[in-house]
Image (tube, coloured by chain):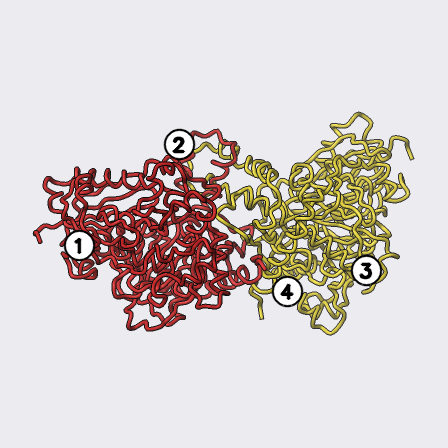
Chain colours: A yellow, B red
Amino acid sequence: MATGALVIGLDFGTDSVRTLIVDAHSGEEVASAVEAFPRWTEGRYCDPARNRFRQHPLDHLDALESAVREALSRAPPGTAERVVGITADTTGSTPGPVDRAGLPLALLPGFADDPDAMFVLWKDHTAVAEAEEINHVARTWGGEDVTKYVGGVYSSEWFWAKMLHILRGNPRVRDAAFSWVEHCDWITAVLTGTSDPLTMKRSRCAAGHKAMWHAAFGGLPPAEFLTRVDPLLAGLRERLYAETWTSDVAAGTLTPDWAARLGLRADVTVGVGAFDAHLGAIGGEIEPYVLCKVMGTSTCDMLVAPLDEMGDTLVRGICGQVDGSILPGMLGMEAGQSAFGDVYAWFRDLLAWPLVGSGRTDLHEEAVQRLVDGIVPALSAAAAALEPDAAGVVALDWLNGRRTPFADQSLKGALAGLSLGSDAPRVFRALVEATAFGAKSIVDRFRIEGVPIRGVIALGGIPKKSPFVMQTVSDVLDMPIRVARAEQTCALGSAMAAATAAGVHADIPTSQRAMGRGFETEYRPDPARSAIYRDLHGRYEQLGGFVANQFTPRGT
Amino acid sequence: MATGALVIGLDFGTDSVRTLIVDAHSGEEVASAVEAFPRWTEGRYCDPARNRFRQHPLDHLDALESAVREALSRAPPGTAERVVGITADTTGSTPGPVDRAGLPLALLPGFADDPDAMFVLWKDHTAVAEAEEINHVARTWGGEDVTKYVGGVYSSEWFWAKMLHILRGNPRVRDAAFSWVEHCDWITAVLTGTSDPLTMKRSRCAAGHKAMWHAAFGGLPPAEFLTRVDPLLAGLRERLYAETWTSDVAAGTLTPDWAARLGLRADVTVGVGAFDAHLGAIGGEIEPYVLCKVMGTSTCDMLVAPLDEMGDTLVRGICGQVDGSILPGMLGMEAGQSAFGDVYAWFRDLLAWPLVGSGRTDLHEEAVQRLVDGIVPALSAAAAALEPDAAGVVALDWLNGRRTPFADQSLKGALAGLSLGSDAPRVFRALVEATAFGAKSIVDRFRIEGVPIRGVIALGGIPKKSPFVMQTVSDVLDMPIRVARAEQTCALGSAMAAATAAGVHADIPTSQRAMGRGFETEYRPDPARSAIYRDLHGRYEQLGGFVANQFTPRGT
């Protein structure tokens, strides 16, 4: 292959797609560009009040073309000719219905404006009832519990629940849908012209973590189970897939048409796609037994461990364990917190109410925005000046339910130990400590099941901008935390996967070593604070036990 | 007695003394005046960080003279000559050390600036350790539990604890103090020149509710008990009092000196003093089995019941039951919430932090104050527009500990059921509901002990200015609440007591009927909301049970 080979990482986020062009040997950035999804930006096809979030496939194609062309236009002359590989990550589970040819229904005449014919975004919560039914049948149908490899609880955010919800509610889509695809699979299929639903290269991570695919089932869950959930699912197992692929594998090369649209050569290798967090973990240089935390509004916590060392270990209460879902040849495990930065945003909005919500202010909009933007930084500074207080406020971070351990979206948050002296910095500090205790509960869950955690890597927005939060998490975990230097770890991880799929490197770990940007900061725990937090964590668990076992109303 | 007789009610509050001159027959107001305590206003002798609050006796005398003269100056000519009675209420327990002549030590040379030689204000919390020791000895000394008539728990805010704290810490005061007086007893003694500590007319309510005086003990608790608490208390029982007096009794007439200072006739009758809340209940027209609630930053809840109907009933978990403490001939019972309006003020200050506490605002002080002042009214309007939500936020109002039921100052407040959608009005509504549930717990405590509650009267600042709070309390109690029309019920109650002591009326109930101002509003419960609150009260009690029984660290 040519010296000076370049690769492209595509990162399809919630609002936009990012194109990152990097040197396939050094990982050095050549150019990048971000393009927003135009229809999504206008709020089309969504109904936030009902938690319905859909994306039109044209948004993805239009933005993809613009972002790649824009990045190339910013790069030195001759860049396009040097590109040898391209891989896409997307959000997920973000499935959509396709016809026999693998074309998303929204691209067919008569379906262009039907939200049910589009991709059902990861955060769409319309399928709560269907998820409950799947869980119920999984526990009662008499066969093996098909949720055992996804942590024991199937979520309304996942593939089967969303598919069933739309099949039930929309007969036109039901009749027209031959099969279903995840967003990351479809992008790869489009670029390579391999979109036959029966043979397109499906992503291992999407299949294993969201569709209950597992080698032990010979693929997707048994047809008998699926029809027990709903006869509408009959036959789908055969029209979906049995084989899945890891992201070091090439799916094909660009079609002449897409090579022309993007301005690239037609022999560019396209790698198998995957979810953003998983390729982000690769970009953040995940390694065995080092927990890789993507920390933003919520967290996604990923761990990999050699298959032979894990044996038959089932890690209960996490969000899934899948052979090769993150790093090929390793068991990939996922966990997470349903709210992390969102907890701080909730408190910011609470405090901003007199300025924003009361309808009484006569301040200029700009002055209000400046005040609101200043709240979390000011709270962080004031809270950082306090010491942990074993007799002070204790918070529970479940304001958006609990993802790990043992997913339960019905749980809620709490504040205890409040006195008239509990001022805003003290409450904020307790909220930050609570999110850190939530992080500790995830580490504890792995350790209880015998899986060691030997280090922590942090990615995402919070690690870059919140030293107080990061120091608190380090103190609570009593572990050092390394913060990845790369700004765009997802796109970088996609580029590393592309470099592997294109044969520049032998495997993904080699790509990581060659192309990794390393770490910019390491937070180290303070022994005195860690000791106090060991006590305070007991109070957090006491409060959590009360909320989970006594205070939350349960269906019969 | 002269037609057109007038009486004066004096109300010594925390910051100032109010003088109210009223017609002894109609209760009609002739004039009033308020005078702040000058040294107190400057913050002298206090250390809020250590919860030390002391008042100089000169503050009381100076302000008393000014306030009476100011009120008389505002009244029509001839007013002074028509005054036939005067009675003072004060805060309490607010004891101070006196010499053999009954002179507060701070009025003696060498003690003028010693805070321990002054009155120890009701809210002074320096005597926490002493209260714990009194409670410990009461449970373990082998004799009768002397706290049985004060609800079973002796408070750091009360007479013996404060006295012991100062006797231990200040040898000079210990040597100089012959006896101790409550503020309300001393004012009466000063005006009548009957200040010999061995014979001055001590108030029944102060003695019974705060000093554990009871007929069953032949007066104050047994000397043996007191010396078991600390030998420093030896001999004090004899230098204090055995007899106590109700507020319908005349203590004497004005001394010529005080008649001259105040500009009144020397034959004016001075009634036995009492605590502000108790004379406030009289001014608010308390009657048997009608709970009289003084609702402000905290609440004082008072109930009277005929002695013969109560028999030997011991109401556990309240703050005391004393023969004649409120109405002569009735058992006077007291309960309360440690924080009521203070709970709302806490939330206001939390929300005001970005404006006031963050140090980042560049707004004008006046604009900030306007915004802060608008927070509770705006929250009330927004919260009132919501409906009770059985699945929403649940709060616990113990942000300043719990007074009733079963006083426990170590308890703290809580918020549960928080989600990302729990905005400021929803949290505020939960806090208001929590204070209402706290009010219900007091009503329940009486009813559980077999004492019926047949009506509710509300006095104080909150009933006048917070219709949303009052409606919520009515809905939660599922009872109507009448709001007293009088603005200054304490001073009016003192005037009613003065009219009785001076012989204008035969007894206090007759004074109440003649001089009462009636009620201005009646809140009536909404049956639909009351039904939801019955469920929500269960969740409040669940949360309270967790905090009290599992979450609060206990000494061994």
Judge whether residue A120 can be spotted in this image.
no
Q: Are marks 1 and 4 in contact (CB under 8 Å)?
A: no
Q: Mark 3 against mark 1, which lies toward the viewer?
A: 1
Q: Which residue is mark 3?
A: A242
Q: Which secondary structure lies at badge 2?
A: helix
- Label 1 – label 4 distance at C-alpha: 73 Å
Q: Which mark is residue A132?
A: 4
- Label 3 – label 1 distance at C-alpha: 96 Å
Q: Are marks 4 and 2 on the same chain?
A: no
Q: Which residue is mark 1?
A: B499
Q: Are marks 4 and 2 in contact (CB under 8 Å)?
A: no
Query: In the image, what residue type sits under mark 2?
Result: Glu
Q: Are marks 3 and 1 on the same chain?
A: no
Q: Mark 4 against mark 2, which lies toward the viewer?
A: 2
Query: In the image, what residue type sits under mark 3?
Result: Ala
Residue at 76% x, 40% y: name it: A482
- Label 4 – label 3 distance at C-alpha: 25 Å
* Disc 1 residue crowd, few under 14, some 14–19, many 20+, Cα 10 Å: many
- Label 2 – label 3 distance at C-alpha: 70 Å
